[in-house]
Image (cartoon, rainbow, N blue to C red):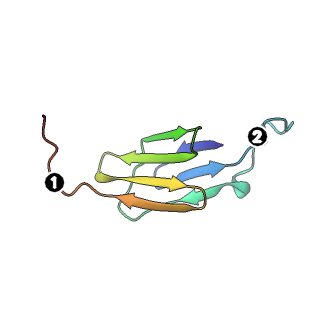
């Protein structure tokens, strides 16, 4: 998987590791976007379970992608030190 943080979305490609293609086309990318979740400045991927998350400095939520599904997780209260 290759994920790129963009101004208004996250672009995700599924890449075959043995493929000779060095530049996947943007027409092959899956675009993930949520209203108000921009600019996307950070993406993180966990190869163990295939979860992709993204963050935006203007949104207190994170976008979580798991397989073909994606959803937004919003913080509802303040975090407190224990």
Residue at point 58% right, 44% down? 3
Dividing the picture into quadrants, the one containing residue 48 is top right
Where in the figure is residue 49, as x and y percent of width and height? 57, 44
Left or right of residue 76: residue 16: right
Task: Tell me the residue that label 1 is attached to.
Answer: 77
Left or right of residue 23: residue 75: left
Where in the figure is residue 66, as x and y percent of width and height? 54, 54
User: In front: mark 2 or mark 1?
Assistant: 1
Residue at point 78% right, 36% down? 17
Residue at point 30% right, 53% down? 59
Task: Tell me the residue that label 2 is attached to.
Answer: 23
In this rendered view, identify the residue nearer to me: 28 or 54: 54
Q: Label 2: few (<14), some or many (≥20) within 10 Å?
A: few
**Separation of marks 2 and 1 at Cα, in angstroms:** 43 Å
As helix, strand or loop, the secondary structure at mark 1 comes to loop
Where in the figure is residue 79, as x and y percent of width and height? 16, 44
Where in the figure is residue 63, as x and y percent of width and height? 42, 54
The mark found on residue 20 in the picture is none
């Amino acid at each position: 998987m290759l994920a790129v943080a963009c101004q208004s979305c996250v672009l995700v490609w599924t890449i075959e590791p043995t493929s000779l293609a060095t530049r996947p086309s943007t027409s092959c990318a899956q675009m993930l976007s949520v209203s108000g979740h921009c600019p996307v400045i950070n993406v993180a991927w966990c190869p163990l379970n295939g979860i992709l998350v993204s963050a935006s400095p203007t949104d207190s939520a994170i976008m979580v992608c798991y397989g073909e599904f994606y959803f937004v997780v919003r913080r509802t209260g303040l975090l407190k030190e224990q």
